[in-house]
Amino acid sequence: MLPGLSTLFVFLAWTVFVLYSVSILTWLVQVFVLGRNQLVSEEDLAYGHDDVQVRILTIGAEAVVQATVDSVPDAVEDIHVIAERDIEIDGATVHVVPEEFDCAARHKGRALEWARREVSCTREHILYLDEDTIVQNFQGLPDADVVQITEKPLYTGSLLAFLCETFRIGYQYEQRSFGWFTYPLYAWGGGVAIRKSLEDELTWDVETITEDTNFVWRAAESRDLDFRVLNLKFRNQAPPSVRGMFRQRRRWFAGTQHASGLLPGRYKLLFGFRLITWAMSPLIPVLSLLLLAVPQYVPESTLYQFGSLGLFGVLFFITLLGTLVYLPRERVTLLALPLTPLLVVLNTAGALWALISPVHTFAVTEKVAPAPEHVSPREIERVHPKLEPGAFEHHDGADRLIADGGVDAEDDAIPAPQE
């Protein structure tokens, strides 16, 4: 290797090593220190099914939405579907956002804002679901401004994308610490409950492509936000293709980057650091493998060599956490462990793509976003080895979709009813 290239490689290696070391140490503190005893327990539930209105956002995926509506517990009677075109749904009231409705928000935010203005709600909380979210274990909500419900993606046909989701779910153990922060690090809109009075105070009428995180950050900016995490693991669809996953991650990165202007200085620094390490994550497995393959070209420091192997090992530990969420029934996730280096690269490649080629969807003026990639419930039942025909239709969201799946590294905060 030429001397100049060797120096450049060493500099790059040390830069990535330092950044990712801080990132991993921060994650470990979040998971094992800040996140301890932070999940909502059964005793914390202050509101029951009667205190919740459910709203499901969709372009017009009728079969997918019907499965979501069917999954809502029978005791929840106030269910609304907010759609961009007229669809027929049993068990819910369908509202179509008028084409002439205009506001600052675009895409999903526009539909959210129209529903806020036009759909009556007398309940304490609105539980927002994505069109592909399957409710499970739902017994009620704690007394909080925002309640984030955890997710657990379903296999939809792309094994590689599903295994990447397994790694992501392991990393999302950090969500347990989010109530500790003044500004929660992000929000997942596929399962989030918001106090109705807070929604009316803040509205959704802002231009963004990550509506849920943007809303939570504006809420934190306006008050001492009470943010809780409810570990119910609502089932949602894993991306049906690796390409679709790349686009999804790219949009997440760009939306978070765009919304970071809402943050105070110390949080801007934190999020800037997180964004950089997120985008550089694909380099960690590559550099670690180079250490093994061509050790003569990597820094000779013992700290670097053992530290790099340690960071590499933590990636496998994160995958293990994600795998534990799916065991014992969904054992295919065990394949994620030996594939961890590849999964890390694929899972975060969309963020690197967004850093190199930023998304500017939030600047486009069309009112309705393109329909997301989803798989029909029947197709999921066909390809998923643990789902029988009719599983979605007969599922009640007070129970688990897959009976004894979902063993966590610790017990669920709220146990599922005995079947």
Image: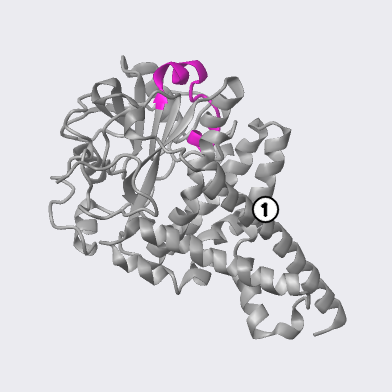
Quadrant for residue 15, please give it. Answer: bottom right
**Rendered location of residue 182, percent (x, y):** 60, 31
Residues packed near mark 1 inside 10 Å, few (<14), some (14 to 19) or many (20 plus): some
Q: As rendered, which of 312 and 284 lies closer to the eye?
A: 312
Quadrant for residue 228, please give it. Answer: top left
Relative to residue 88, is residue 59 drawn left or right?
A: right
Name the residue carrying label 1. 276
Relative to residue 418, is residue 349 drawn left or right?
A: right
**In the rendered structure, does residue 207 fall within the stretch colored magenta?**
yes
**Rendered location of residue 307, percent (x, y):** 68, 68
Q: How many circles with numbers are drawn on the protein? A: 1
Q: As rendered, which of 255 and 26 lies closer to the eye?
A: 26
Q: As rendered, which of 372 and 123 lies closer to the eye?
A: 123
Amino acid bearing label 1: Ile
At a point 40% along the width and 67% down the height, the residue shown is: 160
Where 129 sits versus 252, above or below?
Answer: above
Query: What is the image's colouring?
Result: one colour
Where 90 sits versus 319, above or below?
Answer: above
From where the camera sits, is residue 415 visible? Answer: yes
Quadrant for residue 223, please give it. Answer: top right
Query: Which segment is the magenta one?
Result: 194-214
**In the rendered structure, does residue 215 fall within the stretch colored magenta?**
no
**Rendered location of residue 373, percent (x, y):** 37, 52
Q: Residue furthest right?
A: 3
Where 29 sits versus 388, above or below?
Answer: above
At a point 66% along the width and 59% down the height, the residue shown is: 20
On the rendered image, what quadrant is the N terminus found in? Answer: bottom right
At a point 69% along the width and 85% down the height, the residue shown is: 294
From where the camera sits, is residue 365 visible? Answer: no
At a point 37% along the width and 23% down the height, the residue shown is: 115
Judged from the image, the secondary structure of the residue bearing numbered disc 1 is: helix
